[in-house]
Image (tube, coloured by chain):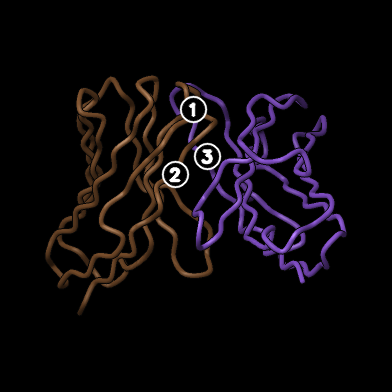
Amino acid sequence: GENVEQHPSTLSVQEGDSAVIKCTYSDSASNYFPWYKQELGKRPQLIIDIRSNVGEKKDQRIAVTLNKTAKHFSLHITETQPEDSAVYFCAASIGGNDYKLSFGAGTTVTVRA
Amino acid sequence: KAGVTQTPRYLIKTRGQQVTLSCSPISGHRSVSWYQQTPGQGLQFLFEYFSETQRNKGNFPGRFSGRQFSNSRSEMNVSTLELGDSALYLCASSLEDRETDTQYFGPGTRLTVL
């Protein structure tokens, strides 16, 4: 089955600095890669997603890059703010099925004021 | 539109019992997926329903089952509960539009098995 590895497991950055989280996947058929943010005690919320026909996507301070050949994708957060502190999960569709996602283990991001 | 809702929010059961969790998707969404979230295993896919049919299934034992009703509401059932079933159970709904098939999560049901 699909295996998604996510690194690092924890990340501490100074406010204003950038944060980068990397994920790798194993299923060549994966074609949908969402990123979710989960604050303590709350539901995961989609922050950005990318499809395999696109190499990069940006939404304000958040960007995602995808390298299908190497089977890895990354989340970039620029100008980090304290409210960016949360657990971030990457995911990859399994077998090309958008409705069946395999999640990474999560990255706990702490933004120091 | 109202978001995805799940009931109950918290549940305490004992080993051997069974439990039913409910999920109401966003209005108009026909796909409902279920996930189990634990500190050790993270978020794991249980199954997905669409038009009252189980369309996808994860690698969980047969004690975990689900169904979907004609109004897209979904339930999942866990029989013969084990201590390891203690987890946050999340459902997510999706519109199933090729351009916007984002999965929106509910708040989850926190199940504790004693």
Colour seen for chain A = brown
Q: Is residue B59 left or right of residue A39?
A: right
Residue that label 1 marks = A98
Mark number displayed over residue B103: 3
Name the chain under label 2: A
From mark 2 to mark 1, how far is it between C-alphas?
A: 13 Å
Q: What residue is drawn where x is 54% and y is 44%? A: B104
Q: From mark 3 to mark 2, how far is it between C-alphas?
A: 13 Å
Amino acid type indicated by mark 2: Phe
| x then y, percent, for residue A78 | 16, 56
Q: Amino acid at mark 1?
A: Asp
A89 displayed left or right of B113 = left
Q: Chain of mark 1?
A: A
Residue A53 relative to residue A39: left or right: left
Residue in front for this viewpoint, A65 or A16: A65
Badge number at residue A103: 2
Which chain is depicted purple?
B
User: For the residue carrying disc 1, how many other residues have a C-alpha within 10 Å: few (<14), some (14-19), or many (20+)?
Assistant: many
Q: Residue at x 83, y 68 (%)?
A: B14
Which chain is mark 3 on? Answer: B
Question: If the image is split into quadrants, where does the C terminus of chain B sit?
Answer: bottom right
From the top left corner, tell me how far across and down residue B38 is, in percent. Answer: 55, 59
Mark 2 and mark 1, same subunit?
yes
A86 in relation to A104, above or below: below
